[in-house]
Amino acid sequence: MTLPELGWNDFFAARFAEHAANGCVPARVTLQLKGHFEVTGEFGAKLGECTGRFLHHATRQPALPAIGDWAAVTPRDDHRADIHALLPRRTTFSRKTAGDEELEQVVAANIDTVFLVSALDADYSLHRIERYLAAAWASGAQPVVLLNKADTCEDAEAKQQEVAATAPGVPVLVLSAKTRRGLKALAPWLQPGRTIALLGSSGVGKSTIINRLVGEQLQDTQEVREFDGKGRHTTTQRELIVAPDGFLVIDTPGMRELQPWDAGAGVTAAFADVAEIAARCKFRDCAHTVEPGCAVTAALAAGSLDLARWQSFLRLSRAAAHEVRRVDKRAALETKSQFKKLTKSLRQRVKEKHGYE
């Protein structure tokens, strides 16, 4: 297999020169298991092992190989290869690890297009789609929303319009992997050497879509529970698959609760229209409530800004700010200090207005 068939391009070639001088060759991480990696290059597929020097410098989990990464390796005579370094990631999809610890987990790297899969059954959630959109924009990859299981929904077009209104400029496609409806519409993103990733909750049909696109039963599938539409994890590992048509697809385990690592940047990108309106406010620190010259309240009154979209923006912005405060204690202290100053200022205004000490 050639490097371009694995997604190699000028971006990575320009950043590999220093490693080539050290006798390394490029390879892509095509399979990720607990503590083990498969790397694939022109030499074929081998079990990748990080060198001691690499592990010494990789002080954080995000610095370790992730599915889709390009690495500088030296193949051995057996079925193994040494991983010496990772090339800079062009795009990175990260989330917070589950649990109380605030750690970044790289789900996949160097993705060109993210297919955000949502089912049109009992598990349909517009708010979850919004969170995935914010995470996709933060990754740097192009998001495309796939509303799967159209065969189970009587108002699929209405839900398509609802999602499209929430995500201006993002393609929103209705399909049914079970009946193959709508799959041909994905062709523009399924080009040779291009990497796509399917992200979504368990049971939304990601594995079935992959099987349809690749043309083989590569991924196991399971039925979802009828009473709530929720599925069990079918995919238990991250894998990069090269399709017969030449595109590359990354399958990931389903994620019911998504906490993007850098949601703030994603929210701004996902709500670029709202941010543009807010930038026209008279005051830079406008709270968009009762301030004079507020462009947001004017747009809401005129109907040029949809109230539901504004509320979605506020909800995701607050969630992103909350996560920042949890991670950054200094930000939390600064927020507390600002709140005290604001409260003191309001009390002073009340005293001056009513003329008492």
Image (spheres, rainbow, N blue to C red):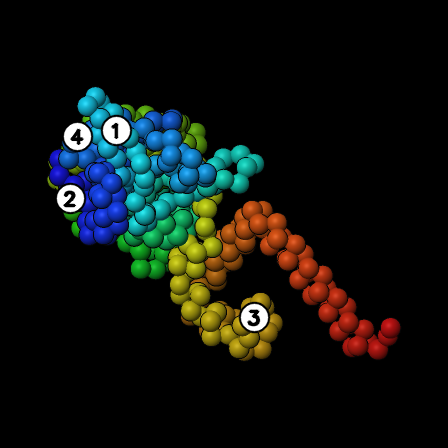
Q: CA distance from mark 4 to mark 1?
A: 11 Å
What's the residue type where badge 1 is placed? Ala
Please name the residue that numbered disc 3 is placed on: 286
**Dot 2, how many residues are within 10 Å of its Cα: few (below 14), some (14-19), or many (20+)?**
few
Cα separation, mark 2 vs mark 1, equals 20 Å
* Circle 4 or circle 1, nearest the eye: 1
Report the side of 235 relative to 210 (left or right): right
Mark 3 or mark 4: which is in front? 4
According to the picture, the residue beneath numbered tag 2 turns out to be: 4
The C terminus is located in which quarter?
Answer: bottom right
Residue under label 4, please give it: 44
Q: Residue at x 26, y 39 (%)?
A: 72
Up/down of 349 relative to 161, above or below? below
Name the foreground residue: 35 vs 13. Answer: 13
Whole-percent x, y for residue 210 in the image: 24, 35
Instruction: Find disc 1 in the rendering and name its residue.
Output: 81
Q: Quadrant of residue 199?
A: top left
CA distance for labels 3 and 1: 56 Å
Whether residues under marks 2 and 4 lie with C-beta atoms below 8 angstroms apart, the answer is no
Instruction: Identify the disc placed on residue 2.
Output: none
Q: At numbered mark 1, what does the secondary structure look like: helix, strand or loop?
A: strand
Nearer the observer: mark 3 or 1; the answer is 1
Could you say whether the residue bearing mark 3 is in a helix, strand or loop? loop
Measured from the top left, where is residue 38 in percent x and y?
27, 29
Residue furthest to the right in view is 357
> Relative to residue 224, is residue 315 drawn left or right?
right
Q: Earlier in the sequence, mark 4 or mark 1?
A: 4
Residue 64 image position (x, y, % from top left): 38, 37
